[in-house]
Structure formats: C-alpha cells, structure tokens
Amino acid sequence: MTTIELDTVRKEFGDDIVAVDDVSLTIEDGELVVLVGPSGSGKSTTLRMIAGLEAPTSGDVLIDGIRVNDVQPQNRDIAMVFQSFALYPHRTVRGNISFPLEARDVPDAEVADRVEEAAAMLDITELLDRKPANLSGGQQQRVALGRALVRDPQAFLMDEPLANLDAKLRKEMRTEVVRLQQNLGVTMVHVTHNQEEAMTMGDRVAVMNDGKIQQLAPPKEVYQRPANRFVAEFIGSPSMNLLTGSLDSGTFDADVGDVSVRVPDELADAATADPLTLGIRPESAQIVDSPDDYTFEAVVDVVELMGNVQIVHIDLGGAEFLAEVDPDLPVEQGDSLLVRLPPEKIDLFDGVRPDSPRVERAAERDRSAPAAPET
Amino acid sequence: MSVVEWTRHRLAGATEEPVSLRGAFRTIGVTSFVSVILVATLFPLYWTVNTSFKPAPETQTFPPTFVPETFTVSPYVDILTGAGSSVLVNSVIVSVGATALAMLIGVPAGYAYARNPGKVGGKHLAFWILSLRMFPPIAPILPLFFMFRQVGMIDTYPTMMLLYLTFNVPLVVWLMRSFFQDIPQAVEEAAIMDGYSRLEAFFKVSLPLVSPGIVTTTLLVWIFSWNEFQFALVFTRNAAQTYPVIIPSLVGGHATLWNQVAALSVLAMIPIIVISLLMQKRLVRGLTLGAVKG
C-alpha cells in the first residue's frame, strides 16, 4: 500500500530557474501515473524529488501520508530505473540484481532465490553471469528492471527508461513494464517525453510544461478534453490543428488563409478572449464535396500515405493544416478542395497562449470530473 | 594510411601490404622515424646497464666497449655495501609514504570537484591547486627550508612526504577529477536508490569503477616521488636521504664512479619497470580512460 503525494512542491535552481513550480499531485496505491512533457518541463526533477535525489525548495513530499522531505533516498524504499540504465559495469548481471538486497542484509540463500525469481520474471536467467557491457540495450533494460523489482519496493520510479531503446523494442518494453506493474500491483511513476508512451501506459497522465502540471487525467480524457492549448497540441500524433483568429457572431475567422467557419453557439457564447484559438484533430477534419457553414476551401500541399490513412497537408498560407482521411480518397498535390470542420469536433481555446483554457461544452460542465489543471 | 592505421594493419596480422610506391615510401618513412625514436630512448638505457657491469677502469676506455670485456657485479656490491642500500630503503619509505598521503588527500578532493563543479572552495581553489604545479619547485625551497628548520624537521621522513605533496596533490586532484567525471552520476544515484548511503555508494561503486585511474595516478605520483631530486638535495642530510641525491656524490673530484652510478640507476629503475609491467593492463586502461566516452 503506497500512495505518493506532492504538496505544492517547488524546485528552484540558482536564483532564477524554477524547474518545478508548486506542483501538487497524489498518486494512488497501485496506480501508474505518467509524467509527460517536453524537455525542461520539470518532469524529471519532480521524479527526482519523489526519489529524494533532489530536495524541494519548498513544499512537501509524502509517502503513505508521512512527510519524507528529510528522509534520505536510500531509506525511502523506492526503486528507480534510469534512462541510462545505470548498471554497475564492474558487477555481473547477478551482482547488479543482488546489489539492493546486499544493502538490506538479506541472507545469501534468499538473495540467490530472489535473484533467480526476478531473472525468470524478466527472462534473463541465461544472462546472469554476464557483465553489462556484453548485453544489448534491451537486455540492459531488463537487468535494470530486475534490479528495481527484486527488492519488492514500495514504489517504482521510471526516469525515461525506454528513451534509449529503438522503436520496436520500446513498444515491447512498454507493454512489458505495464504488465509487470499490473502483476505486481505496485505504485509506479513513469517519466517520458513521448506522448504515445504516456497515452498507452498511464492509468492517469500528468502533462507538464514550464514546471507546472497542465492536466492530470486518464489518457482518454487528456486526449478528448485537453485542459488547454498546450495539452491539445502536445498530446496526439499528428498534433491537433490550432488556428488563431477571432469570433464574429458565431463565425470563426482565422488569421491565416481563407478560413471562416461557424462554431457551435454554446462554445462561441462561452468564449471570452480575442484573439482565440480554434482546434481540431486531423482525424476529425473531413474532406467534402458540397460547402456548408463549416467548410473552407484550400489547396493541397503534400499527401502522405501511411497505409491505413493518408495525411493531407493543406497550405493555409503561413500555417499548415493536416487532415487524416481515408486512403482511397483521391487527393493529389495541388488539388483545391473543401475542408469541413464538424461542429461537434471543434474545440475552442480561450486565448492564444499555451495555457489558454479549453472552452467546455455545457454537457461537459455538468459532469463532476474537473478538467481544469490541478496546479 | 596513418601511422596508427599502419600499426593496426600490421597488428591485425595482415600479410598483404598495399603495393604502391607511395605506400613503400611511407613504410620506409614510418619505420625510420620509429627507429630513431627507439634508439634515442633505448640506447641510454642500454648504456647504463652496460656500464653497470664494467669495472671502473673499463668505463673510461676509448673506444668504449659495447659489451663489458670484464663482466663484473662489483659495482652493485660496492654501491649496496656503501651508501646505496640505505638510500634505496629511504627512497622506498619516502616515496611510498608520499604517494599514500597524496592519494589520501587528492582522491576525495578530485571526487568532490567532479561531483560539485564550481561549488568546492568557490571559484579560485581549483585553479590555486593547479597553480601549485606551475611554479618551479626551486622557488619555495628556501622559505620552506627555514620553516622546517625552525621546527627541527630537516632530514626526516615526514618532512619529505609533506614536501612532495606540493607537486603530487595537484596532479592527483586533477587526474582523479577527470577519472571520476567519466563515471556517470546515475550509477551512484542508482546505488543510493538501491539502499546505500552516499559514502557506501562511493566505496562500492565509484571507487571500483575508477580503479584503473587510481592505479595510473598512484604509479605516476610514485614515480615522481621516487625520482625527486631538488627537495631531497636540500632537505636531507643522511637519515632521510633518497637515492637521487647519492648519485651526484659519486661524481668525485678525482674520479667518477660511473659504474656505480650506473648500478644504482639500474637498481632504481627495476621497481618502476617491474611494477609498470605488472600493472600494464590496468595502466593502459587508466591512461585511455578519459579518452573514449561510452
């Protein structure tokens, strides 16, 4: 049973660098929370403060309700997996995995059993007598995981552990880490800059930027109801189309191109800022034959066939607009076509800054789940 | 083909030389260059060994003999029954003590500098330590001499060990700093997360990983201390006299005992050569430790 709680935790480096800006976050027992954000967003620093490798400038870190600010990292009973794996090159795989047990004066026979058990779980039994230098990246990753889980820690902290693996292996390990976490039922905090990893792994995702949590919610909610413009753009691939412009009696006029579309009244009425941002995901944009209030005309720049879909790059004269459409739709470079933004899929962001909040629909406002950022 | 490539090529056991006039000239060039260097470095060594087995008169003959005509070990017997044995013992005590002291001080300092760049001792301490190696050792000798005489510490082992810190500590600190820098901080942090204190992490992880660097540094510091002349000349009389000071005393007004000079030199070289050979594998690893990342 392990909950991890951050209470207005702040980390400053030097006089003017605020790495983590009053972050509050509660990670429930057995939950896998992914901290995701671009580099410099403060996600790794947040993780290192949970680990105890960095001391918060202010605020409290609590494990199971007990303040651990002054507890040394080695006494927090938390395991950490590093981006570089940080294996001990002078020890064999067996020596690496048994190292945390040796610190706890576990009897030799039990150490041997538990190392074997962990190795079996990760399918690295035949590697036990090798040195880390003779292992592939994926094998090193498994050893690092083995070292973390052998001592049955209260929680796992993962600092971009998949970033150094190639794409195929990264997906395999992603699944494996989630499987391990579920089987062990252990609390885990996973840090990544990869939004796909965040979406697929997390029970909840904390999207970070500029040292703040922008949104903390289950992956689906983060994707469907991004709290603000930053989250909307960061989560999802290809990114959400964001057009800045202004509203004039229910019609959105974009700053670039010849885009003038109607937006639903409930959104238009709730928006207050001018200029503001209209957002639509590439897969929601449609290419249609007949114009209506929700269409605009544009010229195709590039077409990329991905197999199951094709991505149409549309030049808006200064901005690019992507539409993900059926691969059989006959579209070619230079074509002039009608793009439709279905009203039920349109998002409005109240302003043009990354932290401009998403305008909620009435049905969403009625729900209890808060979509506003926690910080 | 560069010299390095050529050497690799040869070491790889390649039998087929690239057949071209240019290649041939290059091979000749490289071979002659290496030969000149080899002769320049090895001939004095050979001549010292050669001289050390000659009776005194034969060292003065002209033309010189390239192999002793009268082979004798008496120079060794003479020097060891004379001043030689005690100065060699003194040299061992002083150099080993000085090396241990310098490593004891310098290794933790180097670690501190590697892990907290810019924080230890402010901006200037690091440069000050380095600057200790910049001035000629002769410069502080006189003031140091008066200081040590005042406290009655001339001609003692501890004095020599302390004096040698002046040039050894900067070397240890700067070498060890870069050796420690090559050890990723994450490895230490992993040990801490695994349940060890920072000090335990240092001894269980960082120190073993940096051991080739320690071997290299120890050997360099020890060789400097073993061969040191200036401080030893001024600060020792008899009790703590080291071997380099004895050698000039063999160059007398009437006759120079070249064969004994050579014999003592050979004796002084033996431990360095033996230890270097024993440590060769680790030594090379240490010397290249900072060179290749990853």
Image: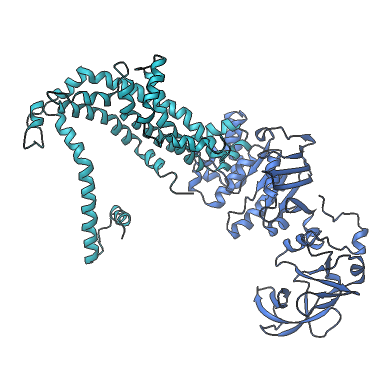
Residue A200 vs A62, above or below: the answer is below
Q: How many marks?
A: 0
Residue found 63% across the figure and 41% down from its top: A148
For this rendering, which residue is in front, A255 or A304? A255
Residue A293 visible within the image? yes
Question: In this figure, which colouring scheme has been used for the structure?
Answer: by chain
Q: Name the image quarter holding the N terminus of chain B.
A: bottom left
Spot occupied by residue A355 in the image (x, y as percentages of width and height): 79, 58
Residue A203 visible within the image? no
Residue found 21% across the figure and 37% down from its top: B45
Residue found 35% across the figure and 29% down from its top: B225
Spot occupied by residue B64 in the image (x, y as percentages of width and height): 8, 36
Colour seen for chain A:
blue
For this rendering, which residue is in front, B220 or A297? B220
Colour seen for chain B:
cyan
Residue B280 vs A309, above or below: the answer is above
Please state if B74 lies on the left or on the right of A134 as rendered: left
Residue A287 vs B180, above or below: the answer is below
Spot occupied by residue B209 in the image (x, y as percentages of width and height): 48, 38
Spot occupied by residue B177 in the image (x, y as percentages of width and height): 49, 38
Please state if A100 lies on the left or on the right of B220 as rendered: right
Residue found 91% across the figure and 57% down from its top: A367
Residue B85 vs B41, above or below: the answer is above
| Figure quadrant of residue A69 | top right
For this rendering, which residue is in front, B118 or A143? B118
Please state if B130 lies on the left or on the right of B255 as rendered: right
